[in-house]
Amino acid sequence: MVKKAYGNLSVLHQNVQSLKNKLLELDMVLKLSLGDIDVLCFTEHWVKEDYLNLIHIDQYKLVSYFSRKKHEHGGSCIYVKEGIRTKEINYFNNLNEEKEFEMSVTELIDYGFIVLCIYRSPDSDFQIFVKKLELVMQKTQLKKKKLIICGDWNLNFMVDNNKIQEVKILLKSYNLTNLVNLPTRITPTSKSIIDVVIINKQIVKSEILVVEMGFSDHLAQVLKIKTENNKRRNVSIMRRQLTKENINEFSRLLAKESRNEVLKHSDVNASLKAFMNGLLYCFDTTIPYKKNIVKKSTNKKWFSRSLMISSKKMKLLNSLKKRFALTSETLGYIKEYNKIYKRVLKEAKKKG
């Protein structure tokens, strides 16, 4: 019998409380501390739709997101490593609702998983949340796909109340389990498990880590699953290569295009279609798609030893701030240190 080769799938969830001002720290943590994370899930990204599409995370692509339009903050989004094939999921579109159920979702084609990242506001209607959650589970079960659900639900799994019991019964009925068993939010006066990572119970080759990233008052969760697929290695993707030479060739070819086909139509839509056909022909001829092998980034030059030490110190200080009632003087020092650290990071990135 041939032994199957297993590959690791790793998923990170972090309630980030503003993604746009943590991109440099995130880049550093991903490349130096956490290793090879395949899927990044963020709740409370606090970013509007038009700006979120402009945010770039090195080696990752934005595949799904929810941004608020009426209220501030909130939101969820999923970034997936370049080279991992994903599929857009449309049959959940009508479930999203600000505060009640803020979901981003994607399918990892080669792994057979549907990944959902869900944020629930603490002042939302619990029954609306539960009903929508059950609809997600029903639809996924019909599709016969494995599930990874993560997010911040603002439901404390460390206590035993009616809401928690209802959620646990629901998960059990669909053969799902929440792997997080350590506090994900710690304050000087409380500890709670309000962030979840939920998978199918039959997935036994898995582990969960709760890690301090220093990004918010929440700890991050990292899920690692051994799968029978390892298709992410040596993956090729199709991209257009824009160079000065092929852009000039495109301009030259476009200038030679006859306008007779465009001008002969009396209907403006027919004229536009004829123009676009000519334009796309020139574009595809001079700037075609070419196969590219996705390579792991090695750009770590700007990560100096002093920056790594500062990063560890920042995480320690933020961890102390969560766990202990510190003096105002100490809190002021931590705040000032974070400011300086971010400024130094920015300068180092520019020089690197």
Image (spheres, rainbow, N blue to C red):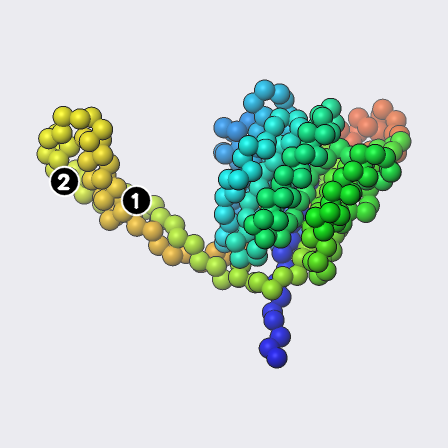
Secondary structure found at label 2: helix
Q: Where residue 78 is drawn, which disc sits there?
A: none
Q: Which residue is mark 1?
A: 244
Is residue 295 toward the left or the right of residue 12 in the image? Answer: left
Give residue 262's quadrant in the image. Answer: top left
Secondary structure found at label 1: helix
Cβ–Cβ under 8 Å for marks 1 and 2 = no
Residue 67: x and y in percent read 57, 29
Residue 39: x and y in percent read 60, 48
Label 1 crowding class (10 Å Cα cut-off): few <14, some 14-19, many 20+? few
Is residue 346 toward the left or the right of residue 281 in the image? Answer: right
Q: Where residue 256 is drawn, which disc sits there?
A: 2
- In the rendered image, the vertical position of residue 242 relative to residue 259, given as above or below: below
Q: Is residue 227 visible in the rendered structure shown here?
A: yes
Q: CA distance from mark 1 to mark 2?
A: 19 Å
Observer-nearest of 206 and 166 = 166
Q: Amino acid at mark 2?
A: Lys
- Give the residue displayed 48% in from the left and 56% down from the top: 294
- Give the residue displayed 86% in from the left and 35% down from the top: 161
Residue 64: x and y in percent read 54, 39
Label 2 crowding class (10 Å Cα cut-off): few <14, some 14-19, many 20+? few
Is residue 58 toward the left or the right of residue 179 in the image? Answer: left
